[in-house]
């Protein structure tokens, strides 16, 4: 009987934690904007993005999201260029991470970041922004290091 009560306690505790997680997800609001990526070959690809501008937004990011439209993403703004490390814990979606310098040039791309992984994904140098897209988008569009991200959120046009 005591074992059954303990099991029931853990079920309710887990449900409460899940409810708290869902509530926390609803509490974080992300402003929306648009930006484009211009490739060295001259092609321009527009994206609708959500902005992660403060600590709460950056900490939450795309955690627990189960889907994201094809040409959508999330832009993390770190305020100044610095070394950035990210991970995929609690992130359901496989993502491409585009690491961007202050001038909008792409410094590094991490394709197909693995969902739920605690492996550190490093910017490999100072960046101001990270753009998260659905996994496979950078390859499908031919986006590469050196290409340019432009738009109002980067204060470089658009």
Image (cartoon, rainbow, N blue to C red):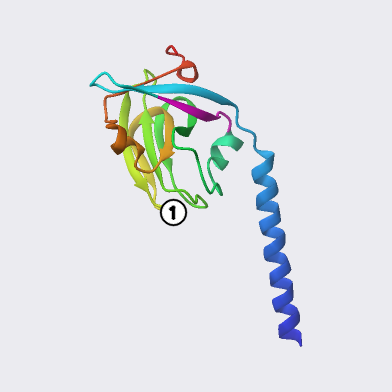
The local secondary structure at tag 1 comes to loop
Q: Is residue 156 left or right of residue 3?
A: left
Q: Residue 80: x and y, percent?
A: 45, 23
Res 128 quadrant in image: top left
Res 36 quadrant in image: top left
Q: Depth check: 80 or 118 in front? A: 118
Q: Depth check: 121 or 61 in front? A: 61
Whether residue 50 appears in magenta in the rendering, the answer is yes
Quarter holding the N terminus is bottom right
Q: Residue at x 69, y 70 (%)?
A: 11
Q: Is residue 42 left or right of residue 152?
A: left
Residue position marked by numbered label 1 in the rendering: 118
* Mark 1 Cα-neighbour bin, 10 Å: few <14, some 14–19, many ≥20: few
Whether residue 144 appears in magenta in the rendering, the answer is no
Q: Residue 4: x and y, percent?
A: 73, 83
Magenta span of residues: 46-54
């Amino acid at each position: 009987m005591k074992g059954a009560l303990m099991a029931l306690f853990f079920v309710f505790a887990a449900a409460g934690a899940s409810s708290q997680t869902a509530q926390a997800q609803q509490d974080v609001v992300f402003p929306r904007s648009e930006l484009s990526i211009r490739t060295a070959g001259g092609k321009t690809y527009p994206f609708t993005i959500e902005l992660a501008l403060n600590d709460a937004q950056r900490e939450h990011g795309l955690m627990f999201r189960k889907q994201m439209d094809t040409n959508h993403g999330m832009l993390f703004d770190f305020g100044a260029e610095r070394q950035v490390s990210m991970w995929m814990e609690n992130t359901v979606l496989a993502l491409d991470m585009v690491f961007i310098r202050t001038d909008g040039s792409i410094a590094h791309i991490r394709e197909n970041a693995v969902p739920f992984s605690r492996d550190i994904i490093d910017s490999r140098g100072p960046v101001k922004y990270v753009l998260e897209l659905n996994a496979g988008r950078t390859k499908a569009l031919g986006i590469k290091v050196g290409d340019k991200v432009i738009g109002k959120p980067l204060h470089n046009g658009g």
